[in-house]
């Protein structure tokens, strides 16, 4: 298949392109970044996803689109909102309209677990509950665990399924949810077929060096590279699902091979995580050990937009698309501790 990979120059997109080529497909990169220098010849369209004419030309002869291009990360400045909405939502709308015009009916979208917000919890008394936004007063006092909104009891975090209600808690999260809604609307109105892969915390070679927008694994890896101790926020007991970028690339390949067989007019969402939650503190330890120190430092600091625990069940992806993660936590973190980091894409 000939597949247009938007954001194909990025961290995840570049691994998707490699996986697709490895599986015998014909990937074409669309990205605002220039192709890397050197002999390696990938087909490359340097263009913004908001450029309707450029995207239209890039779609010629394409069987399916893998839409990775986005502005990523948790912004601290609400003034960035127009840039996020522009790149992520207007960008997706322009891309989908161009696909409709070109008659390209198959889409795999890079979604995110951020659409779930604080995730799923159980109160011993009230069963499944959704804690509200975290309060600065609690966080300042070191009360990091969300409590039952009805009785204040301690809660047990659980695995989020795809049918959990959406609860985006940042500008970025709102744009990732809107991308899914746009793709679902496109599918309904054109008869197209869409799969959204809701990635969990992706890490691995070429993860961008730390910027305020980077993921936590990059913060730690970048600190270690500077000879500094990884600074762990809160108490380090936040639970996440760290999934290796090559496993995410394989999930994209599986989704692209399956999407054309889906019923027209629908979008189906899949969590894409390792299935094995770890705490942020454990991740810092694993990286610091593999790197040979220094030991992580737990700071008690926090970011208001962060959720406490977010871990998902990726069973649907295993059951329906036959995908299995192949890179274990210890092995993946050991590799990442020594792997090169990538350049952050120009953002905000
Ligand atoms: N990294 C994670 O842990 C994670 C988790 C969940 C979801 N995602 C999603 O995965 C996708 C890829 O993220 P990444 O981590 O590889 O980020 P990245 O910044 O490394 O890659 C994004 C790429 O998209 C390109 N791009 C951005 N805006 C563009 C535009 N308007 N037109 C054309 N190209 C544009 C950038 O130049 C970059 O090469 C994004 O959609 C992101 O929301 C990532
Ligand atoms: Zn309760």
Image (cartoon, rainbow, N blue to C red):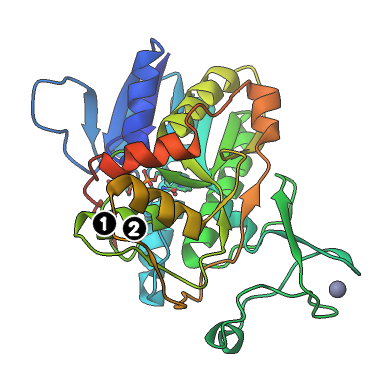
Q: Is residue 99 depicted above or below 136 in this figure? A: above
Residue 87 falls in image quadrant:
bottom left
Who's the residue at 62% across and 77% down the image?
A: 134
Q: Are marks 1 and 2 in contact (CB under 8 Å)?
A: yes
Which numbered dot is residue 268?
none
Image spot of residue 333 (x, y percent):
40, 42
Who's the residue at 19% across and 59% down the image?
A: 226
State whether residue 101 appears in this view: no
Image spot of residue 281 (x, y percent):
48, 60
Instruction: Give the labeled residue for mark 1.
Output: 224
Image spot of residue 230 (x, y percent):
34, 63
Q: Is residue 305 depicted above or below 86 in this figure? A: below
Who's the residue at 85% across and 80% down the image?
A: 151
Question: How many C-alpha atoms fall within 10 Å of the one at disc 1: few (<14), some, or many (≥20)?
Answer: many
The quadrant of the rendering that contains the N terminus is top left
The quadrant of the rendering that contains the C terminus is bottom left
State whether residue 272 appears in this view: yes
């Amino acid at each position: 298949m000939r597949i247009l990979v938007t954001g194909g120059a990025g961290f995840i997109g570049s691994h998707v392109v490699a996986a697709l080529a490895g599986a015998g497909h014909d990937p074409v990169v669309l990205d605002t970044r220039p192709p890397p220098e050197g002999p390696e010849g990938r087909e490359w369209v340097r263009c913004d996803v908001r450029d309707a004419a450029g995207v239209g030309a890039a779609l010629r002869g394409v069987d399916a689109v893998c839409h990775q291009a986005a502005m990523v990360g948790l912004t601290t400045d609400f003034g960035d909102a127009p840039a996020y909405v522009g790149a992520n939502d207007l960008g997706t709308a322009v891309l989908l309209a161009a696909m409709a015009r070109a008659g390209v009916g198959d889409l795999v979208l890079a979604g995110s677990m951020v659409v779930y917000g604080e995730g799923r919890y159980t109160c011993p008394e009230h069963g499944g509950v959704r804690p509200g936004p975290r309060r600065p007063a609690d966080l300042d006092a070191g009360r990091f665990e969300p409590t039952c909104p009805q009785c204040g009891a301690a809660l047990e975090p659980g695995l989020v399924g795809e049918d959990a209600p959406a609860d985006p808690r940042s500008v970025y999260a709102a744009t990732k949810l809107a991308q899914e809604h746009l793709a679902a609307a496109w599918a309904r109105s054109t008869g197209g077929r869409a799969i959204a892969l809701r990635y969990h915390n992706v890490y691995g070679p070429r993860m961008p060096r730390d910027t305020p927008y980077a993921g936590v694994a990059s913060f730690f890896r970048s600190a270690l590279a500077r000879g500094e101790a990884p600074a762990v926020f809160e108490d380090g007991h936040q639970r996440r699902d760290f999934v290796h970028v090559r496993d995410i690339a394989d999930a994209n390949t599986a989704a692209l091979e399956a999407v054309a067989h889906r019923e027209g007019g629908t979008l189906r969402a899949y969590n894409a995580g390792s299935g094995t939650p770890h705490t942020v503190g454990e991740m810092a330890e694993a990286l610091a050990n593999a790197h040979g120190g220094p030991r992580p430092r737990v700071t008690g600091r926090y970011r208001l937009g962060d959720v406490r625990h977010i871990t998902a069940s990726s069973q649907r992806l295993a059951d329906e698309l036959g995908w299995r993660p192949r890179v274990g936590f210890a092995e993946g973190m050991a590799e990442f501790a020594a792997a090169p980091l990538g350049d952050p894409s120009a953002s905000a």
